[in-house]
Image (cartoon, rainbow, N blue to C red):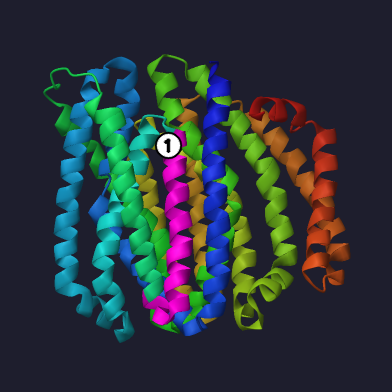
Amino acid sequence: MPLISQLADRFKAELVGQIISVISGAILTVALAHLLNPDGYGLLFLAISVLGTIKTFSKLGVAKSASRYIAEYKETDSGQIRHILKFSFVLNLLTIAVVCFGTLLSYKYIANLIGESDLVPFLLLGVLFLIFGTLVTFVRTVLQGFEAIKAGAVLHAVDRGTRLVLALGFVVLGYGAIGALLGYIIAFAITAVLGLMYLYIRHYRSGKRSERESDLRRRIVEYTIPLTATGTADVLDKRVDTVIVGFFLGPIAVAYYTLGRQIVTFIQTPMSALGFTLSPTYESQKAKGNTETAAQLYEQALIHGLAVYIPAAAGLILVAEPLVTLAFGDDYLGAVPILQVLAVYAVLQSITALTSNGLDFLGRARERAIIKGVTSVLNVILNIILIPRIGVVGAAIATLATYSIYTFTNVYIIGLEFDLQTRLILRNVMVILSITSVMSACVYVVSDYVTGFITLFAVIGFGTLVWLSLIAFSGVLDFRKIISTLS
């Protein structure tokens, strides 16, 4: 099967899995926002942010390092795969044990440090969150290295689907926010067991056997170091700001900030799916000597992604207030300015979705770790400066400012790996910005007519129609070719 057809099949599978994830996540977000008061909602996601931060140290960069070498060796020496799987799994079990033991010793201290004693039961139960959540990450990341995108997508859908049912079920039964966390944990456990069984049967037990290379383990551990640094820095970007908001402003502000970030995460689905699909392909094509093919894949994906996400961000800024009011109620109006700032952040994320993970597979984890570390520390500093002065919007501004630096540096680094057609990319970006300006003007004129969901969807549909007409006329996107490829 031609490469493009293979990638299209994998992308469709990952996209379906992520769509299921987004729909279930959207339902869960809206339902929890209504079933739990802002204090309970904020407390739940403050706990998840703390646990997500701790989880960085339980997973380290083990799975990503294994995935990188799997992507390389499956093309050059598949007999090493069993050794990579066995060593990385044992290593990850060791990191899980150390971190969980440390959490059991310090969970009360962590809650007191944040200033939320109500976090204590969440963090104690969170030890199970760390165990099964880390194993789910291990399975899905390793499957990416095999380019087993379909299997990974199924597991992702299982995780998010069962999370929806179980978390809501426990809340409805009266267990509140702690019940929702328990639902997350059971969903992780089910997914981890299924994923590990699949890995063992499909890729370990039936894998080719050969003598282990003498320095294989050393290289896996060494590449884990920059990946761990990047993962830690990523947590500073995506988790610690929530903790800082909770420290300075309390659970209600956390609820506003979390809501804004979750909405942005929902609209990232297509690009996340495409980036997840393409990242291991960059390395596999490089291993075959096809760097020009990899460069063309990246260029086209980047242009197509920006053609969608720049106009989408502009539209989200214009309809943010009625969207939040209608979906979540007046109690969450504080999330509107956060969402408007993070809409621009969504464009940057669409770029890094295609770039960052690919750099790890291309062996550029060290460079990415350095810039990620610098921008993440800067993000924390800006959060501490801005949040006490301008409130929770300061967290969004800090994220946008530092992530901009990180994004453009990532593009520069991948440009060192691939001979990119910079003029082609910039020319298409200028056309996309022009189209976005016209579409935004049209949406702004009719946005005052939004009075309910029907009129909101009508305005969004009108903006989409204007965008489709202009983008098709410009030739930036060839819809016939796209439909033909995906069908």
Query: Residue 165 or 212: which is nearer the viewer?
Result: 165
Left or right, residue 219 beside residue 396: left
Left or right, residue 334 beside residue 294: right
Residue 150, x across and y down, in percent: 47, 35
Tally the marks: 1
196 lies above or below 40: above
Q: Is residue 161 magenta?
A: yes
Left or right, residue 436 beside residue 259: right
478 lies above or below 464: above
Residue 313, x across and y down, in percent: 67, 55
Give the quadrant of the C terminus: top right
Q: Pointer 1: what residue?
A: 151
Residue 287, x across and y down, in percent: 38, 18
Q: Disc 1 residue type?
A: Ala
Q: Is residue 80 visible?
A: yes
Per the image, label 1 sits on a secondary structure element best described as helix
Tag 1: Cα neighbours inside 10 Å, few (<14), some, or many (≥20)? some
Residue at 79% in and 30% down:
475
Residue at 14% in and 26% down:
215
415 lies above or below 342: above
Left or right, residue 329 beside residue 28: right
Q: Is residue 245 magenta?
A: no
Q: Quadrant of residue 111?
A: bottom left
Query: Residue 252 or 360: which is nearer the viewer?
Result: 252
Residue at 60% in and 36% down:
302
Residue 108, x across and y down, in percent: 21, 79
Q: Is residue 364 visible?
A: no
Residue at 28% in and 45% down:
61
- Span colored in magenta: 149-178
Main SS of the magenta part reads helix
